[in-house]
Every structure is written in structure tokens, then in C-alpha cells.
Image: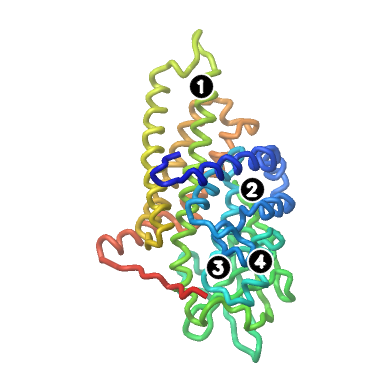
Amino acid sequence: MDKLFYTEEHILFRDSLRDFVKAEITPHITKWEEEGKVDRGVLKKAGEMGFLGLEVDEKYGGMGLDFMYSAVLCEEIAQTGGSPGFSTVIASHSYLAMNYLVNAGSPFIKEKYLVPSVSGEKIGSLGMTEPFAGSDLRALRTTAKRDGDFYIIDGSKTFISNGYYGDYCVTACKTGEGISMIIIDLDSEGVSRSKLDKVGIRCSDTAELAFNNVKVPVENLIGEEGKGFYYMMESLQEERLTLAIANIGTMRYALDLTLQYISERKAFGKSINQFQVLRHKIAELETEWSAWKTFSDHTSYKLSQGEHVVKECSMLKLKTSDLLNKMVYDCLQMFGGYGFMEEYPIGRLHRDARVIPIYGGTSEIMKEIISKIVVDNKNYKPAYKKV
């Protein structure tokens, strides 16, 4: 680990996290993939260890640590037996849903939702994407109409990670002329959930949510009414950075898995890691990984120091998503026919990796954000007024 960005405490944290992953997560990944869900018990254990609230203030049960601890978590969790699905469950809870509670939640919201989220008693999701809106957040159709002390919510969301087995959804709704973020308890009357059958990341539950006259207390409004679009723009940079860091971890797992395999596999009387064509491919992949790992660490450090890093996060999400797909494709090729078998994790990784350039903002959206900053000199400013 590069000591330019990480302290001895970060390194010790990585070691303890690896022990937890090895004991509590890796042995169960195949079972969770088959069942299409992660055991809630392991999420509670993660909460007990403080892993779900690393940056959350201690008065709400968190650890009060800097973002570099989150960078370590996202990278290590992504190496849990080669399952981007598990890291999606954790990231969707801690760095999507909880991000809004931490940055703009009222004291009421923090007590009711943030505290049990940190402990793993409640699992959250983020409801942005809609069947007819996609990446166009301004085209949202889900509405929240004020009725006394309540909002009445109607509409639908789709592709919602943690939406089927989770407890609440931080939901983007139209309120008047703007967009607001409102927490909806997913066991509320009028909420229906449909589990989506995905090609990959199968242990990460993904749902379509429908809201029919759902009655939600006004206290569940996050921050100010009408400011939701700006909150989303602010939160998305951390979401995309954590996704990119997870990509870095997944790539490291794929490379290490392949290095082990080609050292053991023999052909024509010698280990196949002695064939130049494979050695040079590994050299290329390792070089690319090292470059993006360094950029990722640097960006994480800048974020931990309070810098606004929209451009860097967008670049990382764009390029690590592409590189992950390329790397897993190339690594599977080195396994030959065995790479196409379900018993080898590299095959599952190949299936899972395809969604990475799509979720959390498509590669096309990332290019447009970068273009606006570089070509149009757009300046994205912080939106949160800390509560």
C-alpha cells in the first residue's frame, strides 16, 4: 500500500478487514449468488465491526474516520471471492443511500434511519432511475404531493439495488417545480416490489418499485424541498469514486487469480506463465492497473481533504469500468476452456463486469460530464449545507 496516501492506521485497518472478509464473506459468496441475496446476518456483523459507517459521526454510531478508510473498504470488499455483487450491496447501502442521510439528513432522520443503517439493522437503497427517465434525472415522473403533515407519493423506480430485500429507499420525487429526496419505508402501504432477474451480480438484489398513494411523513424529507437534483449531483461523485475503487479491487482479484492459474497450469512440458505471449499480456494489464490504482488513490486522498473532484471521479468511473471488462476478458482467455466453467470465479467475473459501464452512470454520461468540465469550463459546486 502506498504510504504517500495511507497511514499505518489505514494499513492495520486493511489487515483487519481482510480477516473479516476471509472468515465471514468469501466462503459464502457462491451460496449467495445461487440464492440471489446476501445473508442479512453478515451485514449486521459488518455493522458491529463499524464497517458500514466509517465516515459517520460517532454520536450516530459511526467511526468518524476519513474517506481513505472507505477507499480501503471498497477495494477489499471487491475482492470477496470475485463477486462485484456483494460489493454492490455494501456500496449501495453505505455510499449511496446513507450518503444523503449523513450530508443532508435532519437530526430526526439521523436518529431514525442513520443509526440503524450504521449498525446494519436497516439496509437502504437509492431510488433515482425510472422506467421512462433513465439517465435524464430531470424527466422523473414520480411525484410527492404535500397533504398536511404528509407527502402522497405516486410513481415507480427501476434497477434499484437493495430495493427488494432492503428496508428503505431514498427516493427522488418531483415536488412542484423541483426534485426532492424523500425516504420511503419499503414496507409502507402502497409500495410494491418486483425482483429483477439479472444476467450477473446476482447476489445483489435489484428491484422495480411501484408507489401507489404512499403516505410518507414530511419529516422524511432530506434537506430542503426542491434541492434534490443538486444533492444528487453532489452525491454522485462519491458514488462513482467508490465504484471505481471497487473496480480496482476486482481487477486485482482477477489478476491474482490468473497469475496463480498460469503458474500451475502446464502445457508442452512447462508452466504456461513461461510463454511470452501470456507474460507480455500480464505485463500490459499490470501496468494499466498500477496507473489507475495510483490515480484512484490520489483522487481518494483529494476527496478526503475536502476537494471537489467531479472530473476525476467521472474519469475513474469511465476508464476503470472499461479496463475491468478488458482485463477480465483477457484473463479468462488465459484460463482457456476452464475459464468458461461456472466452478472458476473468472467466468462469473466476466458475466458480472458487463454491467459496470452501465450502472452508477453510463460511460456515455461520464464522457458528457467530463466534456462539460473540459470543453465548456463548467464548474460543479458543492450543494450540501451540512446539518
86 relative to 146, above or below: above
Name the residue that disc number 2 marks.
202
Q: Residues within 10 Å of mark 3 (few under 14, many from 20)?
A: many
Check residue 102 in the rendering and tell me which mark sits there, or answer none.
3
Depth check: give the residue in front, 355 or 147: 147
Q: Residues within 10 Å of mark 2 (few under 14, many from 20)?
A: many
346 relative to 174, above or below: above
Q: Residues within 10 Å of mark 1 (few under 14, many from 20)?
A: many
Is residue 240 visible to us here?
Answer: yes
The mark nearer the N terminus, 2 or 4, is 4
Dots 4 and 1: beta carbons under 8 Å?
no
Name the residue that disc number 4 marks.
115
CA gap, disc 2 and disc 4: 28 Å
CA gap, disc 4 and disc 1: 47 Å
Is residue 354 visible to us here?
Answer: no
Dots 2 and 3: beta carbons under 8 Å?
no
Q: Secondary structure at mark 1?
A: helix
The mark nearer the N terminus, 4 or 1, is 4
The residue mark sitting in front, 4 or 1, is: 4
Depth check: give the residue in front, 61 or 161: 61
Q: Residue at x 68, y 59 (%)?
A: 119
Name the residue that disc number 1 marks.
262
Residue 337 x %, y % = 56, 25
Whether residue 217 sits left or right of residue 66 in the image: it is right
Q: Secondary structure at mark 3?
A: helix
The residue mark sitting in front, 1 or 3, is: 3
Whether residue 345 sits left or right of residue 137 in the image: it is right
The residue mark sitting in front, 1 or 2, is: 1
Quarter in which the N terminus is drawn: top left
Residue 190 x %, y % = 72, 76
Residue 186 x %, y % = 70, 69
Q: Secondary structure at mark 2?
A: loop
